[in-house]
Amino acid sequence: MSQRAAIIVNPSKLDLEELRTALPSIESSHGWEPTLVIETTPEDAGYGQAREALEQGVDLVIAAGGDGTVRLVIAALANTDTPLGILPAGTGNLLARNLDIEPLDRREALDVAFAGEDRRIDLAQAEVERPEGDKESYIFAVIAGIGLDAGMIEHTDDDLKKKIGWPAYIGGIAKWMIGSGAFRARYRVGEDRTWGTRASTIMVGNCGLLTGGIRLLPEAKLDDGVLDMVIMRPRGPIGWAMVGAGVVARGLAKQLGASGRRPREAGERKMRVLNYYQNGEFTFRVDSKPESFELDGDAAGEIVAAHVSVLSDAVTVRVPR
């Protein structure tokens, strides 16, 4: 019996007519029926469209857009058996990068979506508390956090990002460092005791390869049933240089197959500018002012606390064979 896919398209990221023209030959070459094409809107950037596709009984849902589109589509597919294909068209394409779909060209990425190998991966759920006390819950696939990464995204000029890509984030980093900085927070790894810290960034991730080949969380794997957290505690330019050197060194060691040190446990109190942890859940609360929060490269407002937990084997994705 022939199968049918739905493709959820962010029209600001792809030429919709070009996509409609390319789809028939790809569908027919793999023996699929004509694809249901659904556009995202500013009011609904992917979640509702993916739920609509599921209600129509499609056999595959393809997210065509940037990391924000992918995150919302994957949230709708969580804990279902319908696989996700990815047609990356954003600045970072972080999940696609970690799945070896980026930097495939668009024809190759669609071939993977229609005829690739199925892989079950973990997701993560962040339950956050807003400054006013409201609670919200989000599902994400790559990384979430407060501090430098969130401030960078919040302060990056979107028009500049469209023109030059990820280097535009450098300006966002500079603006954040001028207007913000370190904060006081408490954190807990799993069910362990709570620790206090002064930090510039707290990030929890499901995978660790970022734009530019940076391996921020080198021990993180998409299907290991745990999450990884990094806390950056630099003081001044020398401290940031140490953070940068530590991230690069740890990433290279992993890439070259060296046996790196295991992630540090919460009870190990030797102070460093860069600390890694691994567990199924993490909790942190900001003791100073509210901090900007980001999910998979999208700004998500200010929060005062978050509980992040792993959703093991939560979704099926199509990856290269």
Image (tube, rainbow, N blue to C red):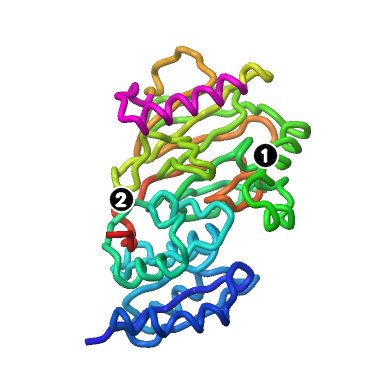
**Residue 309 drawn at (x, y percent):** 40, 45
Give the quarter of the image for residue 228. Answer: top left
Point 71% across, 55% down: residue: 158
The residue most toward the top is 270
Which amino acid does the dot numbered 2 rest on?
A: Ser
x, y percent for residue 215? 45, 36
Circle 1 is placed at which residue position?
290
- Local crowd size for mark 1, using a 10 Å CA cut-off: few (<14), some (14–19), many (≥20): some
The residue under label 2 is: 312
- 69 or 257, nearer to the observer: 257
Span colored in magenta: 240-263
Q: Is residue 261 magenta?
A: yes
Mark 2 or 1, closer to the camera: 2
**Residue 319 image point, x, y percent:** 33, 59
Marks 2 and 1 close (CB-CB < 8 Å): no
* Residue depicted at x 44% and y 75%: 51
Measured Cα–Cα span from mark 2 to mark 1: 30 Å
Label 1 is placed on what type of residue?
Answer: Pro
Where is 64 relative to 91, above or below?
below
Q: Position of residue 288 (x, y in %)?
A: 67, 30
Question: Helix or strand or loop: what does disc 1 sit on?
Answer: loop
